[in-house]
Structures are given as C-alpha cells and as structure tokens.
Image (tube, coloured by chain):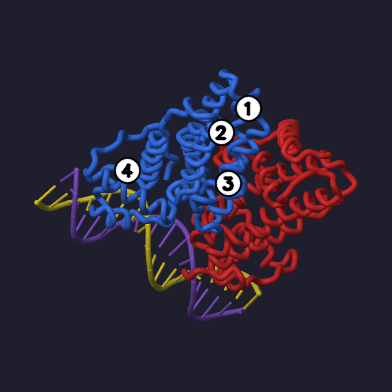
Chain colours: A red, B blue, C purple, D yellow
DNA sequence: GTCTATATGAAGATAGAC
DNA sequence: GTCTATCTTCATATAGAC
C-alpha cells in the first residue's frame, strides 16, 4: 500500500470501453461511500466486469482512486468556461459570477468530491494540491482577472484583485458551505441563491465603489 | 454495523481510569488516521489495555468513535468562554474576536476534527449536527449577540446581527480554511493573522459604520 | 473488569485458463 | 484482455479463565 504518485496518470480512456466503465463505477462508488468503504468487488460488479479486469487496467485500489480524482479534476477545469462578462455592467457581471459559483459549489457532485478529497488528503499528499489547482484556484484566478480588467477600465476601484476576490467569495459563501458539508442544509432554492448573491454583490460594491 | 445513536452517550469517565485512557487513545488515533484506517488493536495498544477491555466499555468501534466525538464537542463548547468585550471600542472588540476565531479555526486540532467529521458525516447522521451545534453555531451566536448589544447601544449600525456575523466570518476566513484543509498552507504566523484580521475588521466597519 | 487466545468474515490482490 | 476461482492478510468481535 504505497503512496501513489498522482503525477503519473493515464490518459482518458475511450468512451464505452471497459476502463471507462470501471472509472464511471469507481466515481459513483467512491463519491457515495468514500475510499475505505468502497470495495473493489463492488466496483467490478457495478462496472459489469470481473475484478481481475479492474486490476489489469488500474494496478491497485489507490491507483484507481487517483485516476478517478484526476478525471474529475479535468472535468471541473473544463466546465469553467471563460464567458464574456466584458459587455455587462459591473453589478450584473458580479451577479452572474456569483450565481454560477454558488450553484456549482453547493451542488451534490461538488460536495461529494470535496468530502472525499478532504478525507483522503492525508493519505494522498498530491490530492489536495491537484484538486485546489483544478477547481478553486482556477475559479479565483478567473474572477481576479475580470476584476483587474474592470479596474483598468476605471469601472471599479480596487488595489489588490486577488484580495478583493477572496473577500467577495468569502462573503458569498459565508457559513453555507460548512452547513451543507455537514449535512444540515438540504439545498438552496434559486430565490435563496439570488438573495445571497445580491447581498454579497451589494456589500462588495460598497467596499469597491463604481465611479 | 448498525447506525449509532449519538444521542445516547455515556458521561465523561473519571480521569486516569481505563475508559479515559481508551478515549484518549481513540482520540489520538481517529484524528490522525481517520475512522477506517484506525484499528481497535492499535487503540488498545496505545491505551495500554487489552482489546477485550475496550469492547467491555465501548460496545463497538462505532460507539467508541461516537463517544470520542462527543467528548471533543464538549471540549469545544467549554473552551468558548464569554469574555468581557463590553468595555472595548468596537474595532478592538472585533479584532479580538477575529484573532481568537482564526487562531482556533486554523489550529491542527480543529483541522483534524473537521476532517474526520466531514468524512464520516454520511455514515453518522447526527455527527454533523452535533459538531455544528457545539462549535460553529456556538461561536456565531456569541458574535451575533455581541453585535446586537453594540447596535442597541448605538455603537454600530446594522440591521441583521446574524447576517452581519456571517459576512464578518466569511471575510475573515476567505479561502484560508480551504487551503489549510487541503494541506496547502503550513500554518499562519501571528503577523499574518493580525493582517488578515485587520483587513476583515476594516471592511466590516466600512459596511457597518460607527457613528 | 481485565486478560490471552481465537473465531469469523471481509476485502485486496493474483494464478491460470481461454 | 478477460474471466473464474482462490490465496492471504487483517480487523472486528467474542469465549473463557482469573
């Protein structure tokens, strides 16, 4: 049971192939039950292949887990499209960013991935780093770049785009993520999300006024 | 392996007794290695008792885990003392609250408890609720009550103390908790904590001005 | 209550045929 | 590459003596 190097990761298998089936089954089971409570027998059964096939493609349970997380990180990174915010007024752009961010953050899939990554980071040292780079860092950089461009155009006043991004996201998230990850909030309705986003945007614009 | 009811929890065992030794060993091992990767053999060995003794006092691994978390929740609740903030200016009071909160939140012990609670909440439904009540909810209520009193005295302007508390803590935490829990930040020095707190307090006071 | 020794079962991993 | 059948290890839990 050696520590797995997440740096050496296979490329994405062809859709519909047996490795892809295994990966899909691994994703479903690991995200639902965690690493330790998922058995290779179950993954093989759900994937509809034999256990030996699983081991033929992924050498061990750890490697399969690492491949599953890597695939998910790729998906997260690809799902964050650089859309066109430039045409919008600042308030509308921030609102759009906020809604998209909060919806993504609180979705069941994101919660499940977060949970399993947090749980297994001590055993897989690279896991946290890769997850952060693919998800949160990606998002933060994108928002910070937008704010910087807006500041350059004189649409908003701010000194430090990265710090302003942190404040914005901090106000946006508040304690919601914590309550959600502890299983205390069923979900957020669209109107609740709107309300939370509007408040965070309003506070942000007080701190960073538009001229 | 039935779901354990965390509501029926034994009282605190006498210090130095064998149950207390077992509980201490369980705490050390569960927080370091998580639930699944900790064996009852190890706990018995660390506690310096036989495995049968462990089972005599705590009927199963799940019950032992539940008792360990319950003990920790008690400790968290007790560690949050209602100190006297009333004499201080608002800025100084918020700064003190912020420093205390951030130091507590980012400490290795808090991180370890958070990690194991997040990981095991799906298997132990009551776990998240009890942890939240003993820790975060406790803290938030305390801060909200202070803000309300300050508002009543006319020291600060705010409509909704609970919401203001969420904003304050959101700005204070920002992405630091996430990076810490993913193993990306070694720790925060005292000066970094001071800087973060000062910035959050400054932003808060812009949003909620003192007359 | 506490111990030593052991039963029982689950799960990671592999051998060998096709 | 894929399967069936099996090996091996290890962890939970208990029996029975003191």
Label 1 to label 3: alpha-carbon separation = 21 Å
**Residue at figure coordinates x 37%, y 43% from the top left:** B68
Name the residue tied to disc 1.
B210
Mark 1 lies on a secondary structure that is loop
Mark 3 lies on a secondary structure that is helix
| Residue A32 screen position, x and y as percent | 58, 50
**Viewer-nearest of labels 2 and 4?**
2
Name the residue tied to disc 3.
B196
The circle on residue B91 is: 2
In the image, B10 versus A36, the foreground residue is B10
Tell me the crowding category of disc 2: few under 14, some 14 to 19, or many 20 or more residues within 10 angstroms, Cα based: some
Image side of residue A145 versus residue B206, left or right: right
The circle on residue B54 is: none
Q: Confirm whether circles 2 and 4 share one chain.
A: yes
Image side of residue B56 versus residue B201, left or right: left
Label 2 to label 3: alpha-carbon separation = 14 Å
Marked residue nearer the N-terminal end (1 or 4): 4
Name the residue tied to disc 4.
B59
**Viewer-nearest of labels 3 and 4?**
3
């Amino acid at each position: 049971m050696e520590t797995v190097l997440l740096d050496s990761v296979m490329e994405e298998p062809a859709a519909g192939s047996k490795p892809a089936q295994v990966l899909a089954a691994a994703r479903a089971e690991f995200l639902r039950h965690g690493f330790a409570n998922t058995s290779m027998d179950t993954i093989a059964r759900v994937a509809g292949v034999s256990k030996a096939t699983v081991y033929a493609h992924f050498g061990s349970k750890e490697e399969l887990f690492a491949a599953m997380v890597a695939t998910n990180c790729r998906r997260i990174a690809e799902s964050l499209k650089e859309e066109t915010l430039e045409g919008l007024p600042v308030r509308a752009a921030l609102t759009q960013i906020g809604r998209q961010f909060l919806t993504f953050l609180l979705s069941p899939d994101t919660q499940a991935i977060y949970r399993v990554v947090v749980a297994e980071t001590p055993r897989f040292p690279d896991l946290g780093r890769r997850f952060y780079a693919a998800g949160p860092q990606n998002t933060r950089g994108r928002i910070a770049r937008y704010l910087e461009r807006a500041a350059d155009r004189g649409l908003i006043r701010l000194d430090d785009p990265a710090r302003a991004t942190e404040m914005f996201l901090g106000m946006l998230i508040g304690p919601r993520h914590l309550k959600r990850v502890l299983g205390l909030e069923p979900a957020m309705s669209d109107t609740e999300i709107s309300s939370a986003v509007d408040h965070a945007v309003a506070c942000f614009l007080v701190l960073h006024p538009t001229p």
